[in-house]
Image (cartoon, grey):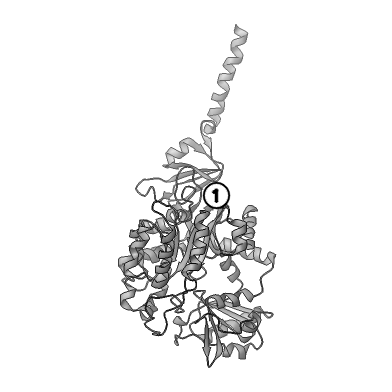
Amino acid sequence: MKNTRKPLLFLLIIPLIMGLESCHDLKKKADLIIYNAKIYSPDSLAKEINCIAVSSGKIIGIGTDSEIRSRYWSPENINASGACLYPGFTDAHSHFTGFALGLRYADLTQAHSFDEVLEILKGYRKTHPEGWIVGRGWDQNNWPQKVFPDNKLLNKLFPDVPIVLTRVDGHAVLASDAAIKASGITFPGKAGEAKLQNGTFTGIFLESLADKLRNTIPQPSAEELTNLLETATKLCHQAGLTSVTDAGLNKTEVLMLDSLQKVGKITLRIDAWLNPNEENFEYFMKDSAYHTPFLKLGAIKMYADGALGSRGACLLKPYLDDPQNKGILTISPDELSAVCKRAYDHGFQMVTHAIGDSAIRMVLHTYSKFLKPGDDRRWRIEHAQVVNEDDFELFAKFHIVPSIQATHATSDMDWARQRIGYERLTNAYAYNRLLKQNGWLPNGTDFPIEDISPLKTFYASVARKNAFGEPEEGFMMENALSRSDALKSITIWAAKAAFCEKERGSLEIGKAADFTILNTDIMKSTENKILMSKVLYTIVDGKTVYKAK
Ligand SMILES: [Zn+2]
């Protein structure tokens, strides 16, 4: 009997001895613990939580420091030193690949006159001596003469050089004669899409003709594109973004993003929206949409009109500052219906750009022919900028999602009244009113049209001021969002708009470990501190993808 008892006693003692050496055996192992943080999640705003544990890219524990550290240990720990941790910020409407491609173009956003545009191009030519000159971001509304330029000086300064300069809204380009020749455009196209003077092109093209010119620009090599996409990823993480949208892609672009995500070169989650072409429909429009933890595919991107800045947004009544012009409807209701039918039949989302009240009305009515009561299709209207008084209720009636970009309001506010007059302006950029209709809404930037910063989006949503803090009293404050709603709009509601709210967007057990850590409590700080906040860490799938120096 003595002999058999000894090993039993020994077996009982071993774990006790090991337990004295380390309490790890009593705790579960995590891959990462972030402690001493002030944690904000849309679903837990009222709770006091400051510690979060992560394993295999997912949240496994969330609570007070003592709660979490009594249950988990981790080889990697981040002391947040009181900094604020939010669910990773999401941009619900952006053009990620376009942003990446634009990194090699001349940046015209800071030009305060057309002369300054020319100066920037001369500098660009020194560093890019060969081939095309491509630029983006000019805005005649920031110049002393607030009129479209023509291409005469471009042709004179850079004879025979193909030049394409995209306006800040992406809906207009200024092209040199050599670029027009290369594009093959020889007639004005759809009414209003080419600006003419004495029967000849001025170099300004809108909508589909602008696309045609851009499509003529030589594409970068696969290696160059990979580098650009990697740089764009880093810039997004630096700004605190963990998820973005890539609006309007073709098959090869989607496959490239997917392959770069799979080898870890793109560490952003992407909601990719397809262009409405047969190649995309054939390859991607299966009854269950392609979906990896990093890539969500399931929406068709359409355009119903242009933008207000270039007077291409389609209005019910003419522009106040251009009485002959009501803008451009870029698609007929029948054409839109045909795509809606395919999307509805395959369970795809419709995502349609509509800015003017006429375009928005057309899209609302077209969507409503397909959507049935009780449907949860989350068909979206992007921008939803100028809504007719009679049409607000249609968003609620058919559960159509208004997708907003808060910085568009503060970028347009200086000239929007001249374009559409006071009465229409009261129903424009009406974000709080749209929120009340649908109960939730996603928010984004439309980058590269606006700056990529989600903090600027948050600030413009709550303060309705531009990055210079203007106007002092805020622009049409009745349509400001509360801080809590603004946070939801760039986290959980942005995820919901892509059908990803079960996977990410808030800090809950089992959801993706995507976090943005700021040195500022944007939920409580004074307004001006929001824009000054610094991103300390961006974490995707439990891995640090950006850390402030
Ligand atoms: Zn866009």
* Quadrant into which the C terminus falls: bottom right
Report whether 167 appears left or right of 386.
right
Q: Is residue 401 above or below residue 162?
A: above
The x, y position of residue 151, in whole percent, is 57, 87
* Quadrant into which the N terminus falls: top right
Q: Quadrant of residue 184?
A: bottom right
Count neighbours of disc 1 (C-alpha within 10 A) and say few if under 14, some if 14 to 19, many if 20 or more: many
The x, y position of residue 297, in whole percent, is 55, 56
The x, y position of residue 379, in whole percent, is 45, 59
The x, y position of residue 385, in whole percent, is 40, 69
Residue depicted at x 54% and y 24%: 16
Residue depicted at x 54% and y 48%: 542
Q: Is residue 417 above or below residue 276?
A: below
Q: Quadrant of residue 442?
A: bottom left
Can residue 391 be seen? yes
- The residue wearing badge 1 is 541
Q: Nearer the viewer, residue 286 or 448?
A: 286
Residue depicted at x 37% and y 57%: 485
Marker count (numbered) = 1
Residue occupying the far top of the picture: 1
Q: Quadrant of residue 152?
A: bottom right
**SS state under label 1:** loop
Amino acid type for the residue under numbered disc 1: Asp
Q: Nearer the viewer, residue 358 or 98?
A: 358
Q: Nearer the viewer, residue 506 or 186?
A: 186
Can residue 240 be seen? no
Note whether ligand 1 is within 8 Å of mark 1: no
Q: Is residue 24 above or below residue 375?
A: above
